[in-house]
Amino acid sequence: MMKKNKKAGSCLSCENFEYDEQFGEEVCIIEMDEDELYRLGDRESRGCPFYRFRDEYRIVRKQN
């Protein structure tokens, strides 16, 4: 689990970004090892490779 960094502005619309009661803030729920976490923090221009747009209507579309 990774806390949101200041560079990751798109985290608010990511489906992997959830509120964690233990930390009292929103965190990324993707489990990463140290190497992945370092590479993510080292990215200056590219976005998060784990980003997935939060689409609340996906389930409704499947039901139709």
Image (cartoon, grey):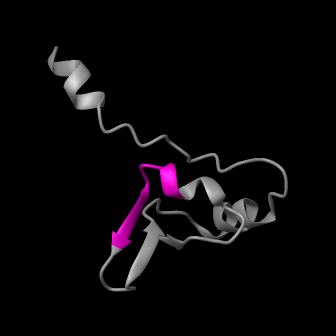
Give coordinates of residue 6: x percent, y percent: 68, 71
In this view, the residue farthest toward the left is 63
Q: Which residues are magenta?
A: 12-19
Q: Is residue 63 left or right of residue 34?
A: left
| Left or right of 44, for residue 34 | left
Q: Residue at x 51, y 57 (%)?
A: 12
Q: Position of residue 58 (x, y in %)?
A: 30, 29
Q: How many tags in the picture?
A: 0
Residue 51, position as x, y percentages in the image: 56, 46
Q: Residue at x 56, y 48 (%)?
A: 50
Residue 27 part of the magenta-drawn span: no
- Residue in the image at 39% along x and 85% along y: 23
Q: Nearer the viewer, residue 31 or 60?
A: 60
Observer-nearest of 40 and 24: 24
Tell which residue pokes out farthest to the top in this image. 64
Q: Residue at x 42, y 63 (%)?
A: 29
Q: Is residue 34 above or below residue 23?
A: above
Magenta span includes 14: yes
Q: Position of residue 31 (x, y in %)?
A: 47, 63
Task: Tell me if residue 36 comes above or below residue 3 in the rendering.
Answer: above
Q: Quadrant of the C terminus?
A: top left
**Extreme residue toward the right, this view:** 44
Q: Is residue 44 left or right of residue 40?
A: right
